[in-house]
Image (spheres, grey):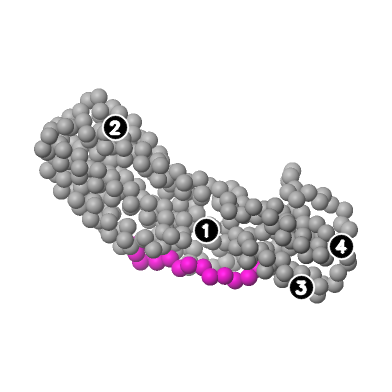
């Protein structure tokens, strides 16, 4: 049993514009990085390349989620596509960050002269392009994990481009070429920091963990306040995606109630679940003197 609730809409058009901007930035920075010899610029370019791939994944997931309907073989449709995209994006960023960090440490011990003018101009292009992308996706990032991962990709890119710009200016005027390796290492650490939360959040959803803000024993307390109910057990709470929380449970009654009475009590339970816990999708199985395990959480074999 379930209630309908408001689901925020997400704009795919803004994502498509952002992909185009990042393709241009990536091509420019890759060419510039090889010509200038800047590892920081190349790391920014690789980061942008990962953005392009992750944004494409996010766009496909967004389209699948909103355009593909449920059917007899896909009863949930593609509602988890965006969570998978968020997980892939975050994991990709962490791996890239580790690789860049290792290369930065190597470069620190073997600094090379770098064409600072090209670094400065391409960093400015990166700041402008990623800044626009951040503005395009900021609204959707507040309520969608997939969009938040794409948004963070762009935000970290913009910040890393600012760091590259500062490094370019220092190399141009003070000839401190080791700063290139330091900036790359800082960017890689920041990438891991920004990606870790999304990686863990999306992993928990894929693993069917209960949302952190829901204390499941509180659900038991509230349900047992209904006098007809003797016991609630075999409880499962999980997230389908960012905003759909599901619950299933067995409800044991004190009396052998009629089906109409069960429906009435179900409505009470659903109201409690929606109002107090934000759970709008529930599947409740009625029981009376049934010989089964009455443990709150069943250890499935």
Disc 1 crowd rating (10 Å Cα; few below 14, some 14-19, many 20+) is some
Position of residue 64 measured from the top left corner of the image (x, y, whole percent): 47, 62
For marks 2 and 1, the one nearer the N-term is: 2
Q: Residue at x 51, y 50 (%)?
A: 202
For marks 2 and 3, the one nearer the N-term is: 2
Q: Report the mark closest to the observer, 2 or 3.
A: 3
Q: Residue at x 87, y 53 (%)?
A: 291
Q: Which residue is mark 4?
A: 254
Q: Mark 4 and mark 3: span between their CA atoms?
A: 15 Å
Q: Mark 1 and mark 3: span between their CA atoms?
A: 29 Å
For marks 4 and 3, the one nearer the N-term is: 4
Q: Report the mark closest to the observer, 4 or 2.
A: 4
Which is nearer the eye, 155 or 85? Answer: 155
Instruction: Identify the mark at residue 264; answer none if there is no mark.
Output: 3
For marks 4 and 1, the one nearer the N-term is: 1
Disc 4 crowd rating (10 Å Cα; few below 14, some 14-19, many 20+) is few
Dot 2 and dot 1 residues touching (CB under 8 Å): no
Residue 10 seen by the camera: yes
Instruction: Identify the mark at residue 104; answer none if there is no mark.
Output: 2
Specify whether 173 is left or right of 225.
left
Position of residue 292 measured from the top left corner of the image (x, y, whole percent): 84, 52
Disc 2 crowd rating (10 Å Cα; few below 14, some 14-19, many 20+) is many
Q: Residue at x 41, y 52 (%)?
A: 149
For marks 1 and 3, the one nearer the N-term is: 1
Which SS type dominates the magenta stretch? loop
Q: Any magenta on residue 15? A: yes
């Amino acid at each position: 049993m379930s209630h309908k609730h408001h689901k925020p809409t997400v704009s795919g058009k803004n994502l498509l514009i952002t992909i185009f901007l990042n393709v241009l930035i990536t091509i420019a920075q890759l060419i510039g990085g090889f010509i200038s010899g800047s590892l920081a610029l190349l790391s920014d370019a690789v980061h942008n390349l990962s953005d392009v791939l992750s944004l494409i994944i996010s766009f496909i997931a967004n389209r699948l989620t909103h355009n593909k309907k449920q059917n007899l073989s896909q009863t949930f449709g593609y509602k988890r596509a965006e969570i998978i995209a968020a997980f892939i994006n975050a994991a990709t960023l962490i791996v890239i960050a580790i690789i860049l960090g290792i290369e930065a440490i190597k470069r620190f011990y073997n600094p090379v002269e770098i064409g600072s003018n090209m670094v400065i101009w391409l960093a400015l292009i990166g700041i402008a392009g990623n800044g626009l992308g951040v503005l395009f996706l900021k609204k959707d990032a507040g309520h969608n994990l997939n969009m938040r991962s794409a948004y963070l990709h762009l935000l970290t890119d913009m910040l890393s481009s600012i760091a590259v710009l500062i490094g370019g200016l220092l190399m141009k005027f003070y000839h401190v070429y080791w700063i290139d390796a330091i900036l790359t290492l800082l960017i890689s650490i920041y990438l891991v920091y920004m990606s870790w939360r999304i990686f863990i959040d999306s992993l928990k959803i894929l693993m069917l963990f209960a949302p952190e803000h829901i204390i499941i024993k509180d659900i038991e307390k509230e349900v047992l306040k209904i006098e007809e109910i003797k016991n609630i057990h075999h409880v499962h709470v999980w997230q389908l995606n960012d905003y759909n929380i599901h619950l299933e449970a067995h409800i044991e009654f004190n009396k052998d109630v009629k089906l109409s009475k069960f429906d009435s009590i179900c409505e009470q339970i659903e109201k409690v679940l929606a109002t107090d816990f934000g759970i709008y999708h529930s599947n409740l199985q009625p029981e009376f003197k049934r010989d089964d395990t009455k443990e709150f959480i069943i250890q499935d074999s």
